[in-house]
Amino acid sequence: MAQGLSYNDALKLLGGSGPLAKAADNVLGGALSVATAGGSDAAISLFDAKTEVVRLGRLVTQKITDLVRGQSRYNRSQRLHAAHGVLVVTAFFETLDTDQSRDDQLAAVASAPGTWIEQLLTATIPAPGPDVPYDALLTRLRDWFTRHADDRIAGAALTRYQEHVRALITEVPEFAIWMRQQEDRAVSRGLEALEATLLRVTSHRDPVRHRAALALTYRAGLGSPVLGGDSGDLTLPSLGTAYLDPRFRVKPGGPGARPAEDGWWDTAVRDDFAELLAVYLTTPQAAVAPMLLLGQPGAGKSALTRILAARLPAADYLVVRVVLREVPAESPIQDQVEAALRSAIGETVAWADLAGDAGGAMPVILLDGFDELLQATGVHQSDYLQRVAEFQQREAVLGRPVAVMVTSRVAVADRARMPAGSLAVRLEPFAEPQLERWIATWNHANAAYWEVTGRRPLTLDVLKRYPDLAGQPLLLLMLAIYDADANALQRDGDELGAGELYERLLHSFAEREVRRIHAGRPDSSMPELIEDELLRLSVVAFAMFHRGRLWVTTAELDNDLAGLGLRPRRETGEGFRSPLTAGQEVVGRFFFIQRAQARQDDQTLQTYEFLHATFGEYLVARLVVQALADAAARARARTLSLGAGAEDDLLQSLLGYTPLCARATVLPFAAELLSRHPDVGEWLIGRLRVAVTRPAYQPRSYQPIEKRIDYWMSTYSFNLALLTLAAGHEVRASELFRYAKRPATWLRDTALQWRAAVPANMFLAAMKSVGVIRTWAGDGRRDLVLTGTPHEVPPPVDIAWSQDYGMVRNAGVTRHDLPLKDALTSMDLSGALSDDLLRHALQPLLERMPEAVEWVVTDGEGRSLTLAHAIVDLLLASATETDDDALLSAYDRAATVAVMAGAGAGVTPLIERLLLADAGRLPPDDLLALLKRVGELAR
């Protein structure tokens, strides 16, 4: 949030110990004299103060260039910030002097003139800031004026303020930066607009030795390809041309901020990123607390810091980019900066010496990858941003004010407390204007490739089909590289399912890497090598999936690969280098896997994460379906079952730890893949039958997480059931438990085991895609059927099915000797939230009419109802705008059930009162008949 000053603080800052500072004391002294004066003395003091304010304001306007000439970048920002505050107050008093008579001015402050002027001169004045667009600043200034005068004066003062600003824009370019109007802008690339803006206010000082070396190093990065590695015949655009200024949201931070939550970001999406940074870097706020730059994986956070380091003019800014993965994680901020300096320019430089020799340049530190410190080390870093702010405060006291920006993934932004005065910026996905600019850059860079190969350039219409991928820069590049190979997106895009798209993308990049690594191998060996690559990537995905995280450590991945029998292909290192582990080998070759790294205790710790979580989810589904198809094929190939091992050994390793419904897209991907294997469904049903009737557990080398054995067995059978439904088959209790007298009860008990083993949120998420049908088997047994088609509206409870009355029902009454208290105690023990919510809704009825849940009546048409159901239905029909026919039916059912159940004193008064209230809605004959029937209950 913009840091405001009071009028007197502004004058003192501008004047130091000179005449302006003394004038400030005189003005405030005049204000205090108003507080103690009375009558005409108060008027004289008030007008003296007003005259002095106007005089000083005009002096500041005339001398503003002298006030900031030769100052350092930070001091210049401070003084201009103060000058702005003086202009605001001057505009107010000039309006008073011009637009009101002497008597009107006195009347405006007659109640407490001393208090009024003292408050005005000591109140914090709204100031420009990176999170305050110009129109928002004008709104805040008008509100500030209104607190000290009426609306007419406030409006006139605001107009006069704008006139002063317009007059100064040519002399003071910073005012032009601060007062920018919000308007449509062309998409800028590589923060060129930021550099051009800051060059308008440059001091043109030549950078000294170390600052010049840093600037040269960072500037050279603009010409490097936007992505490292072999791109084949394609030309990757340079970082400086491919990077597009992002859309963003900005919001003040501070204690209680929740930037990891979408709901916290209630500010509008903006597209003036260069202006945001220009205002930030030319106002004093930058030296108060850090700016937190947030984005999703692949959003371009690291690229942004590289661009910033290259674009900030070295004459005015001393930039140090600190890649946090490359410096000791446990070190203080200053030590991390010094380590980054040595890495950048090859010299050991003390931060104090460098900052002290900066001349007029303002130090800017870019801390890139805070999330990597958290992810790779697992160390608690909740005070990191606070430590950054304390570092800034110390440097300001020592006369070395410094701006700091910290990048992080959005998901871990709540792992560090934001200090007061900080600013949070979240990078947003690309919109169409950015996509158009990016496509133009890509197609221009590869014009020769299109001409030689005959491939078609990429188009916006193609990318618009994949908004989740095209919105993030790295994933957009992945789509572009894939389409350039054979125009696959343009050729088949309309017909591609989501799973097929991910399959082709992953297969394409796996083939690219395999052919690069195994150059010279015959083409006939490629399919096997590609499949092995995708298998290992699938194990990476499962490593994250089972741990309930979007990332996995090297050690965890190595253990998982070893547990499944996958070893490194190369056992020895090159020269004196340590050999790559199996985990490092599989993830090191793919740019769609992001590596987080940190140094701790002289060790390099690494974690891995897919740029888009859906890649991992698809790979999970892919390996599961491959294992299913393989197991089903081996089962079909058997000619002798005696002595044969379990064909689902890999499935048991994979499916016993985590429900497949833990991630929303895994089962839809599995369903799409299973549609290519129609013969797997029957095998699944048979395997599920074994899992629920003869559950067994066999310890295995693959053990990604700790799991209770009973929970493991239940999770395994639950996943088999979900996969059966995904394959388009039903799960019937009578087929699973063929010889059970009550198969529905057996499946119910199995479901209770599933519910106990599976976390409640995951179990309920699975139920969103499941339909449950209570029915009867052909032999008259109660049956329970699970389908993959959920009910649009939950079917009503068939209480006769629950009582196992059979398919043929006779009219009659049943009273269950239900131990209600014991049943409620059992529910207390189970502790299911869904049970508690339903109990809470029915608690008034259970307390007042507990017997109502015990009576079940079957009428002449075979419908079974409890007395409680009939009463609640009647109460709601009476209290709502139910049509009269439905209301009459509700009364008829309630009366029928009450009469047949012999309910008396508890029910009769209730129905009678409702009948009297609804008398105008019921036909007279029906009303009398109902009153007669209900009256018989009381006898």
Image (cartoon, grey):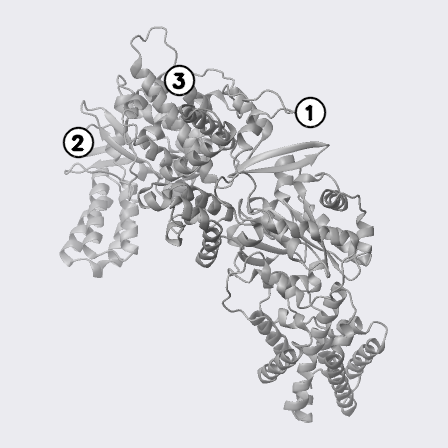
Q: Nearer the viewer, mark 1 or mark 3?
A: 1
Q: Secondary structure at mark 1?
A: loop
Location of residue 315 (image quadrant): bottom right
Q: Is residue 357 above or below residue 234?
A: below
Q: Secondary structure at mark 3?
A: loop
Q: Is residue 179 left or right of residue 711?
A: right
The image shows residue 649 at horizontal and vertical percentages of 42, 18
Identify which residue, 309 or 250, lies in the foreground: 309
Q: What is the distance, in whole Å, between disc 2 and disc 1 at their CAs?
A: 83 Å
Instruction: Tell me if residue 726 can be seen.
Output: yes
Q: Which three-letter amino acid code belongs to the residue tagged 1?
A: Phe
Indicate the quadrant containing the N terminus: top left, top right, bottom left or bottom right. bottom right
The residue that label 3 is drawn on is: 695
Q: Which three-letter amino acid code belongs to the residue tagged 2?
A: Arg
Q: Residue furthest top?
A: 642
The image shows residue 207 at horizontal and vertical percentages of 76, 58
Q: Is residue 594 left or right of residue 639?
A: right
The residue that label 2 is drawn on is: 809
Q: Residue furthest front?
A: 452
| Number of marks drawn | 3
Q: Which three-letter amino acid code belongs to the residue tagged 3?
A: Pro
Indicate the quadrant containing the C terminus: top left, top right, bottom left or bottom right. top left
Q: Is mark 1 in CB contact (under 8 Å) with mark 3? A: no
Instruction: Tell me if residue 715 can be seen.
Output: no
Q: Secondary structure at mark 2?
A: loop
Q: Is residue 846 left or right of residue 434?
A: left
**In percent of the image, x 65 and y 86: which residue is there?**
95
Q: What is the distance, in whole Å, between disc 1 and disc 3 at their CAs?
A: 51 Å
Pointer 3: residues within 10 angstroms few (<14), some, or many (20+)?
A: some
Identify which residue, 536 or 759, lies in the foreground: 536
Pointer 1: residues within 10 angstroms few (<14), some, or many (20+)?
A: few
The residue that label 1 is drawn on is: 576
